[in-house]
């Protein structure tokens, strides 16, 4: 990004002159409706889905969709890549975590850790309560491909398909996922792209909420928030847009 970019679209088989348009272009780029030349200086790293449409003088049109990745040159602008959570596997007890007193311990049984000697066992009481584990973390600027990951185990005494007990993963006020007693599983890797929060300090929260009976346990271990960015390798090569003959 911050380097001029251009792409010449072409068409054949229609009746000239052609009129060009495009949607989904990366910010900073525009298309010349008369020539089909996309040009400009992209400003925002991301992966974009672009649809280009050509219309010929007989009002017949054809579209082509391709992916345009705007990456940063030479290692990019992710100001501080890498893992950002403090104590992500809970081996240092409650260090770095808020509201952690009753969730992080050297549990055995249902709440036993996936690795090491400690985990975070949220809910599992079998009566009405809500329990939240959280950590505030800065996601460095420019790290538009940052991933929050965790291993989550769900064990429930509930049966059937009715939801009674819930577990919500949030970044600030944004809900990334909700799991319930219906989603019982052994430790399973769950991951979310939180790159949209690059440049912000946010609170990651995990909230368990149970109804009045039959426990559901939500057990966390081996979390990570890995700040990164899109690589410079394009994931799609622009295809030529071709005008089709009318039927
Ligand atoms: Ca652990
Ligand atoms: Ca329950």
Image (spheres, helix red, strand yellow):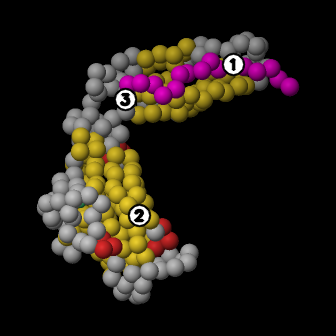
The image shows a total of numbered marks equal to 3
Viewer-side residue, 91 vs 25? 91
Q: CA distance from mark 2 to mark 1?
A: 50 Å
Which residue bears the numbered disc 1?
A: 242
Mark 1 or mark 2, which is nearer the start of the sequence? 2
In the image, is residue 35 above or below residue 70?
above
- Of badges 2 and 1, the one in the foreground is 2
Residue 159 in picture, x, y percent from top left: 52, 79
Residue 205 in picture, x, y percent from top left: 30, 63
| Rendered image quadrant of residue 135 | bottom left
In the image, is residue 17 above or below residue 101?
above
Q: Which residues are magenta?
A: 232-247
Q: CA distance from mark 1 to mark 3?
A: 30 Å
Ligand 1 quarter of the rendering: bottom left
Viewer-side residue, 221 vs 167? 221
| Cβ of mark 2 under 8 A from ligand 1 | no
Mark 2 or mark 3, which is nearer the start of the sequence? 2
Q: Secondary structure at mark 1?
A: loop
**Classed neighbour count for the residue bearing mark 1: other residues with Cα under 10 Å, few (<14), some (14–19), many (≥20):** some
**Classed neighbour count for the residue bearing mark 2: other residues with Cα under 10 Å, few (<14), some (14–19), many (≥20):** some
| Cβ of mark 3 under 8 A from ligand 1 | no
Taking the spot 52% from the left edge, 26% from the top edge, the residue there is: 236
Taking the spot 45% from the left edge, 33% from the top edge, the residue there is: 47
Is residue 232 visible in the rendered image? The answer is: yes
Q: Secondary structure at mark 2?
A: strand
Give the label on residue 231, or none.
3
Taking the spot 40% from the left edge, 76% from the top edge, the residue there is: 216
Q: Secondary structure at mark 3?
A: loop
Give the label on residue 186, or none.
2
Label the magenta part by its dominant secondary structure.
loop
Q: CA distance from mark 3 to mark 2?
A: 33 Å
């Amino acid at each position: 990004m911050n380097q001029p970019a251009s792409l010449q679209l072409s068409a054949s088989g229609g009746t000239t002159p052609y009129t060009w348009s495009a949607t989904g272009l990366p910010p900073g780029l525009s298309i010349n409706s008369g020539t089909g030349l996309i040009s400009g200086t992209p400003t925002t790293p991301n992966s974009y889905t672009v649809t280009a449409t050509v219309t010929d003088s007989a009002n017949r049109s054809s579209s082509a969709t391709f992916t345009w990745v705007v990456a940063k040159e030479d290692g990019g602008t992710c100001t501080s890549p890498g893992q950002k959570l403090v104590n992500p596997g809970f081996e240092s007890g409650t260090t770095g975590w808020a509201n952690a007193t009753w969730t992080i311990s050297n549990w055995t049984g249902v709440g036993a850790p996936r690795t090491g000697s400690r985990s975070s066992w949220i809910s599992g009481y079998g009566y009405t309560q809500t329990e939240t584990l959280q950590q505030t973390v800065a996601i460095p600027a420019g790290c538009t491909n940052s991933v929050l990951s965790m291993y989550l185990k769900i064990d429930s005494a509930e049966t059937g398909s009715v939801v009674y007990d819930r577990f919500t993963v949030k970044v600030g006020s944004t809900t990334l996922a909700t799991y319930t007693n219906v989603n019982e599983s052994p430790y399973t890797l769950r991951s979310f792209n939180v790159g949209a929060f690059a440049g912000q300090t946010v609170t990651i929260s995990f909230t368990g909420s149970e109804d009045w009976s039959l426990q559901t346990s939500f057990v966390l271990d081996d979390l990570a928030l890995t700040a990164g960015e899109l690589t410079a390798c394009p994931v799609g090569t622009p295809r030529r847009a071709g005008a089709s003959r009318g039927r």
